[in-house]
Amino acid sequence: MPHALGHLRVVEIGDGVAAAYATKLLADLGADVIKIEPPDRGDVTRTRGPFPGGVPHPEKSGLFLYLNANKRGIALDVRTPEGQATLDRLVARADLLVHDVHPTAMAAHGLDWARLAARHPTLVMTSIAPFGLTGPHASYRGADVVLWNAGGVATLNGEPGRPDLPPLKAFGDQSGFQAGLNAAIGSLGALFARLASGRGQHVEVSTQECLAAILELTFEFWPYCGLVASRLGAKPIQPLCFMECRDGWIFICCVEEHQWRQFVEIMGRPEWAEMELFANRLARGANFDALQVFLQEWCREQLVQELYDAAQRRRVPFAPVSTMGDLLASPHLAARGFFATLAHPVAGKVTMPGAPYKLGATPWTLRTPAPCLGQHTAEVLAELEVG
Amino acid sequence: MAGAAPLAGIRVADFTWVWAGPFCTLQLAHLGAEVIRVETSTRICVTRLLPPFAEFEPGPNRSGYFNQYNQGKQSIALDLKRPEAVAVAKRLCAASDIVVENFAAGVMDRMGLGYEVLRRLRPDVIMIALSGYGATGPDSDKVSYGPAQVPLSGMSSVTGYRGAPPMHVGISYGDPTGGLHGAVAVLAALLHRARTGEGQYIDLSQWETSMAVLPDAITSWTMNGVPPPRDGNRHPGMAPHGVFRAAGDDRWLALAVEDDAAWARFAAAIGRPALAHDPRWASLAARKANEDELESLVTAWTSTLTPEDATAILQAAGIGAFVAATNRDLAEDPHLNARGFFAELPHPEVGTRKHVGIPWRMSASDCQVRAAAPCLGADTDRVLRDVCAYSDSEIAALRAAQVLS
């Protein structure tokens, strides 16, 4: 079957998750992605791991191998005139250039949009920057923990009764993934626009804004009600919480009244549905200190999978707090063929997340392992000679 | 900004509700697609019923949650439990390039609006289903809510304070992550259709898109049989790295010192340049080995300053740092306001209010929030007449039969 993006040529200058994930999304749908890495150290994710046996090795990082499968890699120092000349030739035959070079370093990397646009009028360039390319904070820096806070997500997570605990970030470089997703959308939008206009353009992505865009219902509490959202406020609706079972944790999710009535049936306590203290979701929220004790006492005797199945049989959307082992052992994910295994010449066989979506006519595919540093330099330079 | 919108002329029949699906179609609306929400007053979209309501006064058109994620879309009221309504929906789908839904798997089929039906009406239609578990597999009939995706995906098991139980992440993270992946898939399918004329069906599982952003946790398990530890705001490759108490009531500063050179700049910035050469702190390994003490040292400095002042000092030294921003901080942020990030467009019931805008800018295409979110059913007559080609008398008959509610 064909690939949806098999006709696209993409150049990536990525250092971290953001640009690499944007172009991974395109590469997995067939785009020919050439990743440029600095010859001396490569992409920073090569140092991040996880590594087999916990031993750092630039060709064995699980994060790097995932983000850069299906791409070709060249080692090129685009801070030198020779490197920029090569970049110019690469870009001349590319549809799209995606980078996450910091705004203060773009000129030094040859990423001057006015010059590129004049030479390559059909090129789309997508720039991902922590705080965008304009505005008083454009020169600011930020790793994930900084951006997750700057975008307003972190202040929403904590323990309500524990003001001593700081806002808590989510696992991993989620800021990078969100920026990468938005960059892919902006890039594909610009490529679609090019079908009609015949012209490329510059797409600019602010990671801070990508995060401010996913605050669920909390942002609007200020413009609509003058209220500041906080991780310390009690949840208005309960039970919507984690509970410890005999063999792990489960997420209890009773948003609708019928879900609560089903849950008390499962617990063998139908009379709780009649108690004024727990009469509706707001009352359960107000009286959750008491309810929590009862629920935890009961849940502690249960098995996660049995409670999950019992709830789901009654159409109540409980979910297990999956461990990584649970995910790899899931019959459902196995039946859908979610996890993918690639053999890498240095790292060996690595199993990683696979297709995030199934496109019926143009499937997601995993074709080649992530490149070793500079693996395709000669091959790509030879292609440039041929033209 | 002289050009047309990227998706000008592309129409989307939007059967989604809550957050994941509407967030997918919001991206398409940002790019200029004509997005038509199919809603009903007999089962109102959950987000229309949730706070915040403008000035605390409930009403289906007054919810900030709905109005944030449905900007620039249209709304028709159609009671899909009625067979006449399904006929209207078919006409809408036949006139649409893209159909988006996020019901539980199988619901669209049972309503007679499955892909096999729609492709006969419109062979090049692109249809995407964003379900919790995906359209196939033994768990495909399970029900899923947004907040449940965070634990289900494994994210909760690796998120939490050091040595403490698993945690949520503060938002239903699987919803926007699923919605954005859905937009990527739809745009790729549109590019394919533009070249080949071929439409297709896309099966998106929110569970799977949620795992797509956890590769380091998953490969830690597949490589070594161990998950990464729950470790608060710390990072294995950077120290200090976290959220530190600042001066003020529940004010915090996030910062990350990325390498040893940054540590030297940090030491100078806080007025203790000797720390750069102190063997207890000079290397990442040393800082990780003494991280509790390191964090006390950092807090001793941050707690004397407002997070804004500390941010200015550290950023001037090239250290990543920022306030742990609240919703109010964001709304009043001079940088975001100077960039024109927020959309403030008139709405008939809540007036002109600040909403979050588009996280990307385009130099040559018209890319903007085009209108406030629609009131429920606001576009019913116009869409039925202009898109579905019903006559005024047919529309009146459908309304009299209470199909358009």
Image (cartoon, helix red, strand yellow):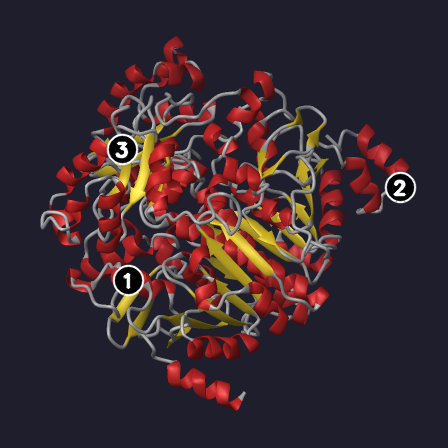
Q: Is residue B290 above or below residue A117?
A: above
Q: Residue A264, position in %: x, y?
A: 36, 22
User: Residue A303, located in which quarter of the rendered image?
Assistant: top left
Which residue is the site of mark 1?
A: A62
Q: Is residue A305 left or right of residue A174?
A: left
Q: Residue A292, position in %: x, y?
A: 29, 21
Numbered circles on residues, count: 3
Chain identity of mark 2: B
Q: Is residue A61 left or right of residue B69?
A: left
**Chain-order first, disc 2 or disc 3:** 3
Circles 2 and 1 on the same subunit: no
Quadrant for the N terminus of chain A in the image: bottom right
The secondary structure type at the circle numbered 2 is loop
Question: What is the C-alpha distance between the residues marked 3 and 1?
Answer: 35 Å
Question: What is the C-alpha distance between the residues marked 2 and 3?
Answer: 68 Å
The secondary structure type at the circle numbered 1 is helix
Chain identity of mark 3: B
User: Residue A169, located in which quarter of the rendered image?
Assistant: top left
Chain identity of mark 1: A
In front of the other: B227 or B144? B227
Q: Residue A357, position in %: x, y?
A: 48, 57
Q: Is residue B317 left or right of residue B281?
A: right
User: Residue B123, located in which quarter of the rendered image?
Assistant: bottom right
Front tag of 3 and 1: 3
Outermost residue toward the left? Answer: B279
Which residue is the site of mark 2?
A: B391
Circles 3 and 1 on the same subunit: no
Circles 2 and 3 on the same subunit: yes
Q: Is residue B181 above or below residue A300?
A: below
Which residue is the site of mark 3?
A: B302
Q: Amino acid at mark 3?
A: Thr
Tell me which residue sits at (62%, 60%) in the image: A190
